[in-house]
């Protein structure tokens, strides 16, 4: 049996193998920090291979750099031996949900998730620290020993663990911020699907640097646009100018693969709500149309809505669309169209019709024909005036054009704080949370209403709130993955007084409350639960020590290297990524001869981590014919069981891939 490597893959070695396959002449050997010979790349030789000219030393070139950039790149590639531990007691609907709430450092989370979730995330939204000098950034110094790490109070200290202040007086003010963001965005790109989108909020302070980081990682050609979000509430401390905007960078994994990003027309929900009220009151159609036009004028809607000012008998709004050929440099088809009442030909547009004759006739016969109260005629999807002297128009319903391209300027009030206060009975627990309306707009901008939607600076949990509301509206199957460092609540804060020890407890409680509200009102069955996972040190003790580090009296402590207090379910979640199984996978816990067996995804993986597992248990597992089977080194009851293990699988399930930890 092969032993599972519990740390994440070494991305540097993966990249070396890829380069070696393309340019075998640039592969060389070098010594690592321990003096071992390892494969390496001769970058001078690689530069020569990639240049059409003779490369003779460094030359000037356009580049974006800062002190610590190479270390930041290296940090993204370093293996991680952490694990995700399940926290059932804080979860909601554990057995059925596909949503995840991950507590811990998001860099570690991204490294761990890369094994399983690479290329599977539909959308990533991040709202990172804006580097105002008053907020915190991540300190990614992982050079501490395991003993030093475990000596800390849990995972994080009273300052939120690896969050550190970054005042403007710091000589590395921008450099530290760039070094914090770079490896996270580098790994985030790996998680995105080929048509995946990254949305990143930022303000003026680091807009240029974040754009350059994303341009480098994604490629400038995949920068779709930068949205200006007009918050409509001025920030009056901005050096003499009432700043009312922030930015949202939009990047695609591969721009060529994405469809149009769309949004609801501004005010569209208000329009349909107003019309429903007219219908409820049974206002006659002529009067209802006047009321609708008055409503449009009062609200100042643009033509994308005001054009649709007619109502059919079911109070559905529609508009008259010009039928003339739209291109001023060419001509459209010319044919006669007969008026439904006068039986005379209508006026043909000067440059011809927009549609060919067959398309026009299909629209003409696509529905009932009748005369309206004003004397005009509706024939299918074509409108005619009272007589043939007016050019007819096509009929388009507002419901069919209720969306438009996502705008580069979005005007939405920044009322996220008010939204959260309503959820928590008027208590103000968060500073400047993003509004649900904004997040919901971004989430709904992608064509698909299913897939994984991720936020690894999740804060108050607005992204989860928006995902649940979007699913409730359209019946979608979007799943959220949130990652948040459990920053401790300041002792004198409202959150601490209310009993919330850290921001994760607050975020989870927000999701619970919103889920309950949505489930009570929803007309469709949606997933309102979430699994809580907590990033932790490996479930196993470090066993790779120098010979002199272990004494004869303690050598038997390492026969079983499982850390005390870790459960068999903890072990399951540590091995799942090794088999590309997502953390949301369904699994059953069954008993075979008194041993706990995990059956993941109906036989994709069978795992048993109990001790004293005998041949009868091994045989029953083999008969289940799983794709993968995994056990502990210390599981086998005796030498005979270990010796017969392979034979039992060869007999009953030779294709099963067997592994031990």
Image (cartoon, grey):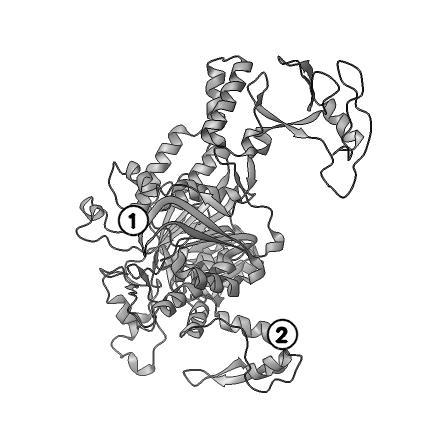
Q: Secondary structure at mark 1?
A: loop
Residue 96, can we see it? no
Within 10 Å of disc 2 (Cα), the crowding (few <14, some 14-19, many 20+) is few
Q: For the residue labelled by badge 2, is the local secondary structure a helix, a strand or a loop?
A: helix
Foreground disc of the pair 1, 2: 1
Location of residue 409 with respect to 118 vertically, above or below? above
48 sits left or right of 35 in the view: right
Q: Is residue 292 visible?
A: yes
Q: Is residue 452 above or below residue 527?
A: below
Residue 391 occupies quadrant: top right
Residue 407 image point, x, y percent: 52, 45
- Give the camera-side residue of 182 and 150: 182
Quadrant housing residue 56: bottom right
**Residue 435: x percent and y percent?**
38, 43
Picture disc at residue 431: 1
Distance between mark 1 and mark 2 Cα atoms? 50 Å
Q: Can you identify the residue that label 2 sits on?
A: 21
- Give coordinates of residue 540: x percent, y percent: 35, 65
Name the residue located 50 percent from the left edge and 59 percent from the top edge: 189
Residue 13 position, x and y percent, is 51, 73
Left or right: residue 382 versus residue 185 is right
Numbered badge on residue 12: none
Nearer to the camera, 178 or 473 = 178
Left or right of 125 on screen, residue 139: left
Q: Residues within 10 Å of mark 1 (few under 14, many from 20)?
A: few
């Amino acid at each position: 049996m092969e032993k599972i490597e519990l740390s994440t893959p070494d991305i540097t070695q993966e990249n070396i193998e890829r380069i070696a396959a393309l340019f075998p002449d640039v592969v060389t050997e070098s010594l690592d920090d321990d003096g071992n010979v390892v494969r390496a790349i001769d970058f001078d030789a690689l530069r020569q291979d990639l240049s059409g000219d003779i490369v003779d030393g460094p030359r000037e070139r356009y580049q974006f750099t800062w002190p610590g950039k190479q270390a930041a790149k290296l940090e993204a590639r370093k293996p991680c031996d952490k694990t995700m531990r399940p926290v059932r007691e804080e979860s909601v609907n554990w057995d059925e949900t596909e949503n995840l709430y991950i507590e811990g450092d998001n860099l570690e989370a991204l490294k761990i998730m890369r094994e399983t979730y690479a290329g599977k995330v539909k959308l990533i939204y991040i709202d990172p620290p804006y580097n105002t000098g008053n907020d915190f950034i991540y300190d990614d110094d992982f050079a501490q020993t395991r003993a030093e790490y475990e000596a800390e109070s849990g995972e994080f200290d009273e300052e939120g663990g690896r969050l550190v202040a970054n005042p403007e007086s710091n000589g590395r003010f921008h450099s530290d911020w760039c070094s914090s963001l770079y490896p996270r965005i580098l790994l985030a790109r790996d998680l995105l699907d080929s048509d995946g989108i990254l949305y990143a909020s930022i303000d003026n302070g680091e807009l240029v640097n974040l754009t350059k980081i994303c341009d480098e990682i994604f490629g400038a050609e995949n920068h779709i646009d930068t949205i200006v979000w007009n918050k409509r509430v001025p920030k009056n401390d901005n050096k003499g100018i009432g700043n009312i905007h922030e930015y949202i960078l939009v990047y695609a994994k591969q721009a060529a693969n994405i469809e149009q990003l769309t949004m609801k027309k501004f005010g569209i929900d208000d329009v349909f709500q107003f019309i429903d009220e007219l219908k409820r009151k049974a206002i006659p159609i002529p009067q209802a149309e006047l009321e609708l036009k008055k409503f449009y004028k009062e609200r100042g809607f643009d033509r994308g809505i005001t054009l649709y000012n007619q109502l059919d008998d079911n109070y559905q709004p529609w508009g008259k669309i010009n039928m003339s050929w739209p291109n001023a440099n060419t001509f459209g088809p010319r044919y006669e169209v007969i008026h439904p009442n006068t039986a005379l030909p209508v006026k043909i547009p000067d440059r011809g019709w927009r549609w060919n004759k067959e398309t026009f006739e299909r629209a003409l016969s696509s529905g009932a024909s009748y005369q309206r109260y004003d004397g005009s005629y509706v024939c299918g999807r074509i409108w005619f005036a009272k007589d043939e002297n007016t050019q007819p128009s096509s009929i388009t319903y507002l419901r069919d054009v209720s969306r438009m391209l996502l705008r580069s300027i979005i005007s939405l009030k920044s009322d996220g704080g008010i939204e959260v206060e309503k959820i928590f009975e008027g208590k103000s627990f968060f500073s400047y949370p993003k509004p649900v309306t904004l997040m919901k707009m971004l989430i709904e901008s992608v064509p698909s209403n299913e897939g994984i939607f991720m936020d690894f600076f999740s804060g108050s949990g607005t992204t989860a709130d928006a995902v649940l509301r979007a699913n409730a509206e359209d019946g979608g199957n979007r799943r959220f993955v949130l990652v948040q460092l459990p920053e401790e609540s300041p002792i004198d804060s409202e959150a601490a007084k209310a009993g919330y020890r850290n921001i994760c407890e607050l975020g989870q409680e927000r999701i619970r409350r919103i889920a309950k509200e949505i489930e009570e009102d929803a007309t469709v069955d949606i997933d309102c639960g979430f699994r809580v996972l907590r990033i932790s040190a490996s479930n196993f003790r470090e066993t790779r020590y120098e010979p002199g580090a272990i004494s004869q009296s303690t050598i038997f402590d390492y026969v079983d290297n499982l850390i005390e207090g870790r459960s068999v379910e903890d072990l399951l979640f540590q091995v799942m990524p090794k088999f590309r199984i997502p953390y949301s996978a369904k699994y059953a816990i069954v008993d075979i001869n008194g041993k706990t067996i995990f059956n993941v995804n109906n036989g994709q993986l069978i795992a048993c981590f109990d001790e004293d597992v005998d041949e009868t248990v091994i045989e029953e597992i083999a008969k289940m014919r799983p794709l993968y089977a995994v056990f502990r080194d210390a599981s086998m009851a005796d030498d005979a069981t270990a010796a017969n293990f392979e034979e039992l699988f060869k007999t009953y399930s030779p294709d099963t891939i067997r592994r031990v930890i």
